[in-house]
Image: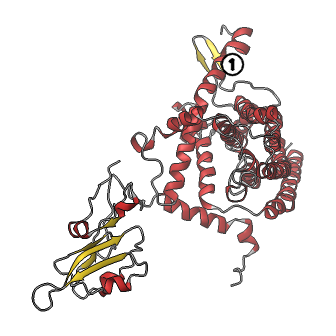
Amino acid sequence: MNNTWLSDYVIIPLILILAILAIFPLLVGYIVYVERKVLAFIQSRLGPMRVGPYGLLQPIADALKLLTKEDIAPRNADVFVFKIAPIILLVIGFTGLAFLPMGEGFELFGYDVSLSIVDVNVGVLFLLAIMSLSTYSLVLGGWASNSKYPLLGALRSAAQMVSYEVALTFTILATLLLAGTLSMSGIIDAQREAGLWYIFVQPVGFVLFIIAMVAETNRLPFDLPEADTELVAGYFTEYSGFRWSFFMLGEYAAMVVMSGLLVTLYLGGWMRPFPNVELLSFLDFIPGFTWFVLKVGFFIYFFIWLRGTYPRYRYDQLMGLGWKVFIPVSIANLFITALAIIVMDSVFG
Amino acid sequence: MPAPEKSWAATALFTDLITGLWTTLRYTFKPNVTVRYPLERSVLHPNFRGILRVDDDLCIACFLCEKICPDNCIVLEGEKGLGKGSKYATYFYLDHARCLFCGLCEEVCPVDAIYHSNEFEGAVFNRADLVHDLAILHKGHAIVHYER
């Protein structure tokens, strides 16, 4: 190996960062395209069909349209905060992407390349901290617009994300107890050593995580901060052009990050299904990145599927569900997990 | 109607939510029902009430359509021709901007002179062009088949 300090910490991460920065906006465009298509199929419609074959160039047309639109700030808005808010969300979304272990390391031109850009030993903690910062973007954007609907959306987002973050954190804690590490790749390794994905150990935690994840990313059926039918577009009502698209990018980046976190915590990250079953070892030729993309892709589809199925929750239902059901259940889940670990340790040494 | 009783287990296992997901999953793979209109055209029902046409050879200028029209969109005048029962319309104006396509005139006409065609692409740039005179009503409005 001819890895040096420079290649490990500067060159390889930089290349990966540039790759993500270049690919991800296009990817988000196509996630939006898939979302429109799937929603259309659910409603027996066709979805975008006019731009390119099967509307495949629609995302590019949309992006061009957004870039050419005028950048408007409302009168009496706090212009600086108004302009900085979407950037905060975008930066948070992209930062989150850096922590996902997207595949096993491989060797390229004599260098060891790791597919997680940064693999810090407190990855999960850092990711949670980063993701909860996104509330700031929504609150600042909503407040700085100086308009009633954005303000209502901002208030809702603050309350919603704070209450669901608690349940989310307790749920993750139970998994961390099992893994014994906060590092994202460490959790995957722990699942490999245990020989099974944590979804089989933590089914309740898995379900809680999915629901809290939907609430955390402000997606239907918990999209109260956006709530098109009540609040026009919630916190980004006053935004237009590429600032609006920053909000969309940030939202979809959050979806990808949360799906990636879910996959890492409960579905073995980039590992193939049943990593310890010899019978399935013929699957080993498929690179880990493919499994990661497939798993994350499924959960992106799941987000869209939920959006096509459920109506929006009422605000008090959302809060009641968060505080009266999710937090007690997630704490109970944590206690039972901890108890089980102690019992297993004392019985089996 | 009271909500159906749900057992505790059904709530915990999200049976209703999963039923919903199953429904939408089935619909995802069903054939779509929309028609890509300018590229393909849907089959019209035989009773489709499109743009009105008048066969002035048949019209006996009885004014029944003018009387029954709820929107007063028909104005006509007739005069007696040679011989018995040979009254005919001298002019006949039908304002499609007012017409609500109810079909009453078609129903009331004793000689089936006024009828709904199955054309629906009657958009024009000038509102006055929606008033059709006897010539247009007879040979039909110039139809533009939109293609893109």
Q: Residue at x 63, y 56 (%)?
A: A306
Please say if A73 is above or below A147.
Answer: above
Tell me the amino acid under the disc marked 1: Pro
Which of these two is toward me, A344 or B29? B29
Q: Residue at x 27, y 63 (%)?
A: B141
- Residue A286, position in %: x, y? 53, 33
Q: Is residue B98 left or right of residue A240?
A: left
Work out which quarter of the rendered image holds the N terminus of chain A and state it: top right
- Residue A29, position in %: x, y? 56, 38
Q: Quick one: SS at disc 1?
A: helix
Q: Residue at x 82, y 63 (%)?
A: A316
- Residue placed farthest to the bottom in the image? B84
Which of these two is toward me, B110 or A249? B110
Identify the subunit bearing mark 1.
A
Mark 1 burial class by Cα count in 10 Å: few <14, some 14-19, many 20+: some
Work out which quarter of the rendered image holds the C terminus of chain A and state it: top right
Total marks placed: 1
Q: Is residue B26 visible?
A: yes
Image-quadrant location for residue B107: bottom left
The colour scheme used to paint the residues is secondary structure
- Residue A10, position in %: x, y? 71, 13
Which of these two is toward me, A172 or B48? B48
Q: Is residue A180 visible?
A: no
Q: Is residue A124 left or right of residue A18?
A: right
Please say if B73 is above or below A52.
Answer: below
- Residue placed farthest to the left in the image? B83
Residue at which label 1 appears: A13
Q: Is residue A51 left or right of residue B94?
A: right
Image-quadrant location for residue B113: bottom left
